[in-house]
Image (cartoon, rainbow, N blue to C red):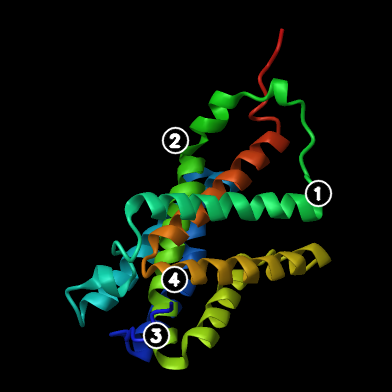
Amino acid sequence: MFNTKYQSVLKFSDVWITSIVLILALPLAYTSAYLLFKSERGATYGCVYIMSFLLFFLPILRVKKYSKAWRNNLGLNKGKWPIGLTLMIGVGVGLGYFAIKSLVWGLQLSLDSSKINVLRSILALITLQGFASIVLGPFSEEVFIRGFLYGYMRSRIGVGFGLLVQAVIFAVLHLDLSFSVSSFGLVFEGIVVGFLLGILYEVSASLYPSILCHSTGNYILFVTELLKAGEMIGVRP
């Protein structure tokens, strides 16, 4: 079921050098974006674009040192499933997770559905903020965390422990720095989601199901936040 025979071409130095470069790049990316856009929101999304670029291309550069088959080494291959099944499971798991979460913890959004601008909700993907949150963020994070970091860890410490470690890393990267009770709840949820995405990668032998699942979740969160802020509510005379 799992890809236990997989062997990463990476060395430990590749992992920590790339990680340090990304850590150092983060404040520089945010500062540069803030100077350009002159607002916190603009700086946040500008930073997402810059960091997404680095999260995607730095792992490729490290892997290409050792192998021309960098797509396979980073999980960007077709895998075991046909395209239709990949799409169905990737999106289905994302929708299913949020459906279960809503049933267990209750819906956190109470709005008159007749007033929701459905078209704007659908088109959220093509806004600069939506594209960053729904496409760039999930794609680059999956390449770095699952394809690059986990790809190295599972060939060194095994599938089970590797899945746990990459899930913790995923949760920490999404940590709310307010350190409130709710922020630690988000860490636990991040570990669960990270583990789920890692399982999708393992059983499919491809990153695409986890990318689709991640993107589906981010789409739901993005549209929900816009709804809460009133940006998706149709204006009636």
Left-right relation of 114 to 18: right
The residue positioned 50% from the left and 41% from the top of the image is: 130
Q: Earlier in the sequence, mark 4 or mark 1?
A: 1
Along the line of sight, the residue nearer the viewer: 176 or 123: 123
Image position, residue 95 (x, y; %):
59, 49
Mark 4 or 2: in front is 4
Q: Of helix, strand and loop, which one carries label 1?
A: loop
> Is 191 placed above or below 212 here?
below
Q: Residues within 10 Å of mark 4 (few under 14, many from 20)?
A: some
Q: Which residue is mark 2?
A: 126
Q: Earlier in the sequence, mark 4 or mark 3?
A: 3
Measured Cα–Cα span from mark 3 to mark 1: 38 Å
Measured Cα–Cα span from mark 4 to mark 2: 31 Å
Measured Cα–Cα span from mark 3 to mark 2: 39 Å
Mark 1 or 2: in front is 1
Q: Which residue is mark 3?
A: 4
Measured Cα–Cα span from mark 4 to mark 3: 11 Å
